[in-house]
Amino acid sequence: MSKAYKDHLGRPIVAVTGMGVITSLGQGLEDNWAALSGGVSGIHKISRFPTDSLSTRISGTVDFIELPAENAVERSYAMARETTLEALAQAGISGDFNGPLFLAAPPIEPEWSARFELADRSPPSERPGDAYNRFLAAMREKADPVFHEAVLFGSISERLADRFGTRGLPVTLSTACASGATAIQLGVEAIRQGRTDRALTVATDGSVSAEALIRFSLLSALSTQNDPPEKASKPFTKERDGFVIAEGAATLVLESLEAALARGARVYGILKGCGEKADLFHRTRSSPDGGPAIATIRAALADAGIDEGGIGYINAHGTSTPENDKMEYLSMSAVFGERLPSIPVSSNKSMIGHTLTAAGAVEAVFSIQTMLTGTLPPTINYQNPDPAIVLDVVPNVRRDQQVTAVLSNSFGFGGQNASLVMTAEPA
């Protein structure tokens, strides 16, 4: 392999040749980017299930895709399928993909309605605590393929593998809010290690339910500013009170630069560096000193072979929770120092909410689009800045500015931290 196709460590350079995205703003990269760069919010009142007794009644749900059954697996699969179709079309790849699939998918649990239905047809209880055995007995008596499909963690990746002809066993991962970035990192590493010339990296999350809202509310993680919905997500402001749960999906086609150019593919961007560190501080809270996040950003920069001065824009994790926004600011301050106030930083979550498992990949797509278009998307709802967080957040209105290197952060529950460095196409 020519040196022109290798990075600073002698590894194959990894190119992005296709992208697809779905969020509450709509389906497809074109519509999403027009709305996102226009400062439009996709957050709305929830209509999928009753919310009368819930403290949070808003979300960024995706309700415009037809499903054969209303559950998180079918919704997540449908979005992953559609974003993959878009990404492959953009990449000019038809027929079998013939490369590995790395999927980030949400943890799988049956919907409460499905549990109640199963309980209704289960035999009477013989002793306390035997619900599991009762459910198994009901399933043995009458099989329910729809329910069975809805509780299989690997079913989404297997269906995608069959549909798009990927190679080998598909990998499904779930590393909380870092999942989308982690899936991309696995694809990058597979190409760098010479195991493949191309990889399909997908992240999807259609898991918004009443139970999800209740669980996150018990953690005091969700915004309760329900009216108006589009004003609820306000990262880095004094009034931020929690994130807005949302749904979405994104697919990136990754190829070695050499293979991409050999087949005449257009290169949309370069996956230059990946960093990942674990945080042992708490099951849900991030370490307040930002140590693991600092190490993650520095690892991504080192992997990319660029220093702090090479980053022109930061796509922040920017959840709009009081603690996480502060931690991310401290982390970025530790890495970028006095230069940080001059680096544009914005949060896509101010408009699309937190797409959880999909967030890292959705925001990677938007990061590449930022470089392609020379447009920095805004952080909306930035009316009352937090004086303790001094950032150029591209407030409220997009900015025309060309950047050639972007850092995208994903800091998740359970100590999962991942950062990606993306650059424009090399000369």
Image (cartoon, grey):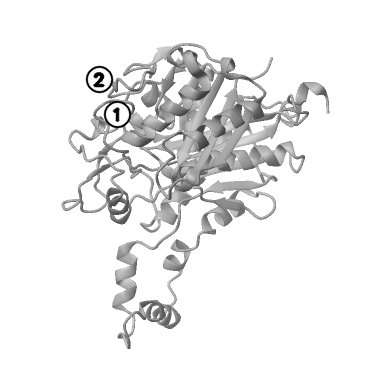
Query: Where, quadrant-wise, is the C terminus in this rendering?
Result: top right
Residue identified by numbered label 2: 383
- Name the residue rendered at 25%, 53% in the picture: 49
Residues at discs 2 and 1 in contact (Cβ within 8 Å) = yes
Q: Which mark is residue 234?
A: 1
Q: Amino acid at mark 1?
A: Lys
Q: Is 150 located above or below residue 180 in the figure?
A: below
Q: Residue furthest right?
A: 1
Q: Which percent across, then down, holds residue 201?
A: 58, 41
- Name the residue rendered at 56%, 40% in the picture: 277
Q: Which percent across, then down, holds residue 363?
A: 47, 32
Kindly state the secondary structure of the residue where label 2 is placed: loop
Q: Amino acid at mark 2?
A: Gln
* Relative to 253, 333 lies left or right: left
Q: Quadrant of residue 327?
A: top left
Q: Residue furthest front?
A: 289
User: Is residue 120 at all visible to an observer of this figure?
Assistant: yes
Q: Quadrant of residue 229?
A: top left
Q: Is 370 located above or below residue 293 in the figure?
A: above
